[in-house]
Image (spheres, helix red, strand yellow):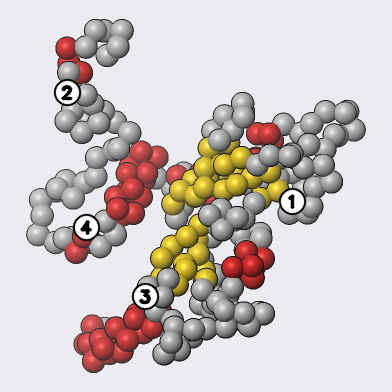
Amino acid sequence: MVEEWLPLRDDFLDELLRFSGSEYLDGHNHVKCRICEEPATFRCADSCSSRRMYCKSCALARHADLPLHILEMWDGITFVKVDLRTLGAEVQLGHDGDPCPNPCQNTRRLVVVDIDGIHQVQVRFCECLDPNDTFALEWVQVFRQGWFPATTLKPATAATFRLLDFFQTGPLCQTLANLVASSAQPRSRSSRYNGHSPGELAVECPACPHPGKNLPDDWASAPDDVK
């Protein structure tokens, strides 16, 4: 009941500020790594259950099997988001997390779309031979990671299986539009819920052509083969 919650508004705000900040920072903005007690500046943004802070090496080790998690780095004033790839994390494909005896010499960036956003992951493909003396295809290695590749030829983009399962719960285009809108403006649409006519809060599909938005000004007079 709202009446029961109203006296707790200040308490909720205090807890929200505590969650967004950190109880582990001292008056000089210093904190020790939970594991090795070296100076710590990193924590998991929201996917891990713990808000404890870690040094860079321990944060990477803790997320070795969680490549799509987003970290937050304390810069001395506030926490800023940083992805694991930026910190040097790599994902070895082909062995379900185990070391590869014959990894590819080079790594490659793979864009992975998940429910919580778009992630850039640095992957290293496996070049081990199977019993037929052939390499495991790259798209197969990506697929076995739980990521559906956008192409079977040198895949550079993939979507997680859980994202594809999520899309099955509703119309694909509208679901994607809602995700994009909520990601860009997480609070404004919810705060304008009441007092509007039907359809006013609808979100246009970002993939559809919209004159004046994602089409060139001269699109209507373009030749048919270009149009």
Q: Residues within 10 Å of mark 1 (few under 14, many from 20)?
A: few
* Residue tagged 3: 77
Mark 3 vs mark 2: give the one in front.
3
Q: Which mark is residue 6?
A: none
Where residue 58 appears, as percent x and y from the top left, is 64, 70
Query: Percent from the top left, x then y, of residue 97?
Result: 73, 54
- CB-based contact (under 8 Å), mark 4 and mark 3: no
Residue where numbered disc 1 is placed: 96
Q: Residue at x 62, y 29 (%)?
A: 154
Residue 209: quadrant of the picture: top left
| Circle on res. 189 | 4
Q: Which residue is mark 2?
A: 217
At label 2, the amino acid type is: Asp
| In this view, the mark in front (4 or 3) | 3
| Frontmost residue, 101 versus 205 | 101
Horizontal side, residue 28 vs residue 125: left or right: left
> Identity of the amino acid at label 3?
Ile
